[in-house]
Image (cartoon, rainbow, N blue to C red):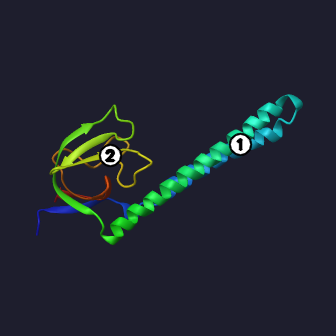
């Protein structure tokens, strides 16, 4: 029996589609707000503003639908990869942890063995993104097992001493 416990810190199968749904709801509400403003300001002088508000509302709703649907389908793709076993697994000690302040979508990088991982809030990716304060449970020297595919961390397991 090993002298440590394996803790699942992240599993894409347990992720839900709440994020995409909230994004869609927020942008739709902004769009509806613009339309409400149009109905409130129906005077002759506000026709230009009304037209601009309608175009803006359509834009906000379109962006919300596009981002929400795209994010949802990327999440489902990652869940399908993990459920079907179509991924690679690397295990070992975390090393070369670095913050990436000049990179737009990735915020941190770390290595396990010879594999380099990037984390961050990139809408084109799914999987583990880190945490509000960086890498979350990933620390230099941690013993981890990572299931991944195409740069996405699908499952993160961390060995913790008993």
Residue matched to label 2:
119
Residue matched to label 1:
33
Percent across and percent down for residue 74 are 44, 57
Looking at the picture, tell me which residue is in the foreground, 46 or 145.
Answer: 46
Residue 100 is drawn in which quadrant?
top left
Percent across and percent down for residue 90 are 19, 58
Above or below: residue 91 compared with residue 99: below
Residue 84 is drawn in which quadrant?
bottom left
Percent across and percent down for residue 12 are 37, 61
Which of pointers 1 and 2 lies earlier in the amino acid sequence? 1
Quarter in which the N terminus is drawn? bottom left
- Report crowding for label 1: few under 14, some 14 to 19, many 20 or more residues within 10 A (C-alpha): some
Mark carried by residue 71: none
Residue 147 is drawn in which quadrant?
bottom left
Above or below: residue 42 compared with residue 13: above
**Circle 1 — which element?**
helix
Position of residue 41 in the picture relative to residue 73 (left or right): right
- Report crowding for label 2: few under 14, some 14 to 19, many 20 or more residues within 10 A (C-alpha): many
Camera-nearest label, 1 or 2: 2
Q: Measuring 11% from the left and 62% from the top, which residue is drawn there?
A: 3
Residue reaching furthest top? 45
**Circle 2 — which element?**
strand
Q: Measuring 48% from the left and 60% from the top, which residue is drawn there?
A: 73
Check if mark 1's residue and mark 2's residue have beta carbons within 8 Å.
Answer: no
Quarter in which the C terminus is drawn? bottom left
Position of residue 93 in the picture relative to residue 51 (left or right): left
Q: Measuring 86% from the left and 36% from the top, which residue is drawn there?
A: 42
Position of residue 123 in the picture relative to residue 11 (left or right): right
Looking at the picture, tell me which residue is in the foreground, 6 or 76.
Answer: 76
**Cα distance, mark 1 to mark 2?**
35 Å
Position of residue 114 in the picture relative to residue 61 (left or right): left
How many marks do you count on the picture? Answer: 2
């Amino acid at each position: 029996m090993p002298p440590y416990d394996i803790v699942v810190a992240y599993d894409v199968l347990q992720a839900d589609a709440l994020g995409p749904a909230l994004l869609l709801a927020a942008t739709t509400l902004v769009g509806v707000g613009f339309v409400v403003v149009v109905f409130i300001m129906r005077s002759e002088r506000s026709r230009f503003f009304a037209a601009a508000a309608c175009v803006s509302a359509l834009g906000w709703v379109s962006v919300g639908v596009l981002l929400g649907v795209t994010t949802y389908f990327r999440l489902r793709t990652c869940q399908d990869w993990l459920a079907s076993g179509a991924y690679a697994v690397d295990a070992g000690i975390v090393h070369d942890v670095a913050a990436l302040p000049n990179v737009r979508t990735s915020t941190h990088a770390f290595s396990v063995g010879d594999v380099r991982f990037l984390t961050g809030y990139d809408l084109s990716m799914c999987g583990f993104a880190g945490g509000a304060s960086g890498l979350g449970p990933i620390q230099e020297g941690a013993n981890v097992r990572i299931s991944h595919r195409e740069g996405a961390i699908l499952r993160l397991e961390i060995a913790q001493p008993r």
